[in-house]
Image: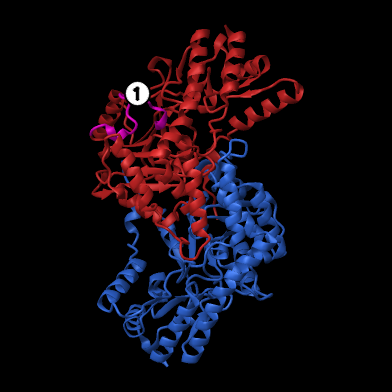
Chain colours: A red, B blue
Amino acid sequence: MKINEHYLELEDSYLFSTVARKQREYQQAHPEKKVIRLSIGDVTLPLAPVVIKAMEDAVKEMGSKATFRGYGPEQGYDFLREAVQAYYQGHGVSLDVDEIFISDGAKSDLGNLLDIFSLDNTVMIPNPVYPVYQDTNIMLGRQVIYAEAGEENGFLPLPDPAVKADIVYLCSPNNPTGAVYSREQLAAWVDYAKKNDAVILYDAAYECFIRDDETPHSIFEIEGAKECAIEVCSFSKTAGFTGTRCGYTVVPMALVSGGTPLNHLWLRRQTTKFNGVPYIVQRGAAAVFTEEGQMQVREAVDYYRENAKIMVDGMKKMGIWFTGGVNSPYIWMKCPGGRTSWEFFDYLLENAGVVGTPGSGFGRNGEGYFRLTAFGDQAETREAMERMIALLS
Amino acid sequence: MKINEHYLELEDSYLFSTVARKQREYQQAHPEKKVIRLSIGDVTLPLAPVVIKAMEDAVKEMGSKATFRGYGPEQGYDFLREAVQAYYQGHGVSLDVDEIFISDGAKSDLGNLLDIFSLDNTVMIPNPVYPVYQDTNIMLGRQVIYAEAGEENGFLPLPDPAVKADIVYLCSPNNPTGAVYSREQLAAWVDYAKKNDAVILYDAAYECFIRDDETPHSIFEIEGAKECAIEVCSFSKTAGFTGTRCGYTVVPMALVSGGTPLNHLWLRRQTTKFNGVPYIVQRGAAAVFTEEGQMQVREAVDYYRENAKIMVDGMKKMGIWFTGGVNSPYIWMKCPGGRTSWEFFDYLLENAGVVGTPGSGFGRNGEGYFRLTAFGDQAETREAMERMIALLS
């Protein structure tokens, strides 16, 4: 047999393993120093009490013949799809339950969605961005072009009418830059997609960090988006589900190509290649949307948002250029002193005992930048900022 | 954008929806009749007490900051991979932990594994068989050829040296036929694969039904199989995880193509397109491998095996040709009176109130055959057999 040769074109990803190795080596050389990690995009607060209660109940159900659940619908139980539907309605977006697919997380669906598109589509990916978009397309041998992000556009690239793409990835609030598209900017992308018969794959995994009234939580708040966009969302950052695994993807019925609703293709893909999310997990996810659940997860997000604010204040004090930190758990800062991303990583670790993520790991336009995350402990985040201010002011 | 046109080549799958509709219509017309379903391949017994206890404990861990788990390793936690490793050792198969990947079930992996192979491989699929093998390959536009199964080979096709395939699917104990390959037959397939530089995708989802000492539980019990096979297994039928979602896939390091270990490709695929199985579920799955867990899940499998025996005895009494039912939860019977699969379905429903699955739904060689499953209630299974004996003897 022959292997898929496109896998050999992938660059080995050493970003987080190198970060971990350098941290470990530093700690071994300086056992007395307390290293603070603001590097990883993983949550640290536990699941909300309503989620725990719902999962405890569901586990009990699975232990009794009368309430046991076997195979569920691949696209998710209606109790959860209806809860997602009501959540969207809260943002003014009306969806049919059949437009909502429950998944085991945004990462899976962002890659798997590519299955339903022709291999000869051209894909546009922001640079820098979450590396999964690029890697999943390289694996399929697709042509990838970039939407160039940088300081000049606030790391929020807008469509270039002269460039033709068939599939466009957008991520807002953005990982890694924390930049968030406004309603007008998203409208420009929807307009581009409709003019070019392109589809937008909209990654809204961080939407719960948005707290102002003007910024859209969903691309479907933009008129016409249902005819050109698929939205992928997750409970990972909203409700601390990074190790519990649940998300949802919206494929509107109005999104049609050559007479075929993409919704039907995705349904066929999911019923053929996926067997649904654990019943127990879906019960936990549904609890997130109860009134009590919304209060509890909001409290956790508030905690992370306060961390972000501590970092924003620190950046302003140091006079360092940055984006993010508002409506987002990420701070994307320019490396002081003209350092490269890795030079600044080493400098910060050695002189302040703070670990972040080199921006160059997210694409070439990330070189010279650095990502800090708001998912850490609050006292440690405060201490990290004090150390950085002492070092860099 | 253009869609993946291969999706339009898929036949719509009406098998189980038509079965359900006909059953519903019959019940509405005859509300006084008790219909017995022996049609669906889903378990009915609850999860084992040790599994429930392990998941309850894990849910508690997720509710406390000190014990909370965020992102885990995509390929699964070592505590579960090591338990799988020990289980294989029990069948005399030595594996490295790195050869074991925890998944959300056999269905996902059987489809996703195709990602790592070139599109121009020729695929050989038994006929009849679990339809997912064929559909996932049609979705990719791959050339599919068939290993013809029938009464003459006991629905256990052997390799034809004149036919060249690159990827070969085997499923043993088989769904839908219940037929099980012997050691010698599997050795013939391993020999074929090695001679043809082919890879065997071995679906062992029903291995726990095997109880005699001669029949291999794993293809890796065959010498040389590590150089030519990937094995996909599941907790669905072993431990009632159809709604809890966990499985495991073994990609041996010795399986190499053009110098590239397929294990590395699969690791790259999984780390890029998957984010692991819920921690809670992995704890539940690990409990299956404890001494107590093995006793408890064996009890459930014994219950289903007894159902199978009741059906085997019934078939013998009626003098109907069948395969399966030994080392397998499926009975694959020839439709009496030369009826087609759907003719017999209607006849059995109308005259005995028993629902099965038409064999033609699993491929053209399934025409004229019928599948009954052992996953039902025991008293109902007994009653169904009595009704069939009364009708068909």
Label 1 element class: loop
Give percent across and percent down for residue A384: 60, 18
The secondary structure that most of the magenta stretch takes on is loop
Visible residue check, residue B252: yes
Asked which quadrant contains residue B83, the reply is: bottom right
Label 1 marks a residue whose chain is A
Give percent across and percent down for residue B111: 48, 55
Name the foreground residue: B125 vs B93. Answer: B93
Q: Which quadrant would the N terminus of chain A be assigned to in this image?
A: bottom right
Asked which quadrant contains residue B85, the reply is: bottom right
Q: Is residue A342 magenta?
A: no
Asked which quadrant contains residue A172, the reply is: top left
Name the foreground residue: B81 vs B265. Answer: B81
In the displayed orientation, state which residue is furthest to the top. Answer: A393
Left or right, B161 with respect to A246, comes to right
Q: Residues within 10 Å of mark 1 (few under 14, many from 20)?
A: few
Up-down relation of residue B381 to residue B137 (above or below):
below
Q: Is residue A216 magenta?
A: yes
In the displayed orientation, state which residue is furthest to the bottom. Answer: B393
Give percent across and percent down for residue B150: 47, 79
Residue drawn at x 33%, y 83% as measured from the top left: B347
Up-down relation of residue B22 to residue A231 (above or below):
below
Up-down relation of residue B42 to residue A76 (above or below):
below
Amino acid type of disc 1? Answer: Asp
Visible residue check, residue B258: no
- Number of labels in the image equals 1
Give percent across and percent down for residue B91: 70, 65
Query: What's the magenta region?
Result: A207-223
Left or right, B183 with respect to A272, comes to right
Q: Which quadrant would the C terminus of chain A be assigned to in this image?
A: top right
Residue drawn at x 56%, y 27% as measured from the top left: A376
Question: Label 1 belongs to which residue?
Answer: A212
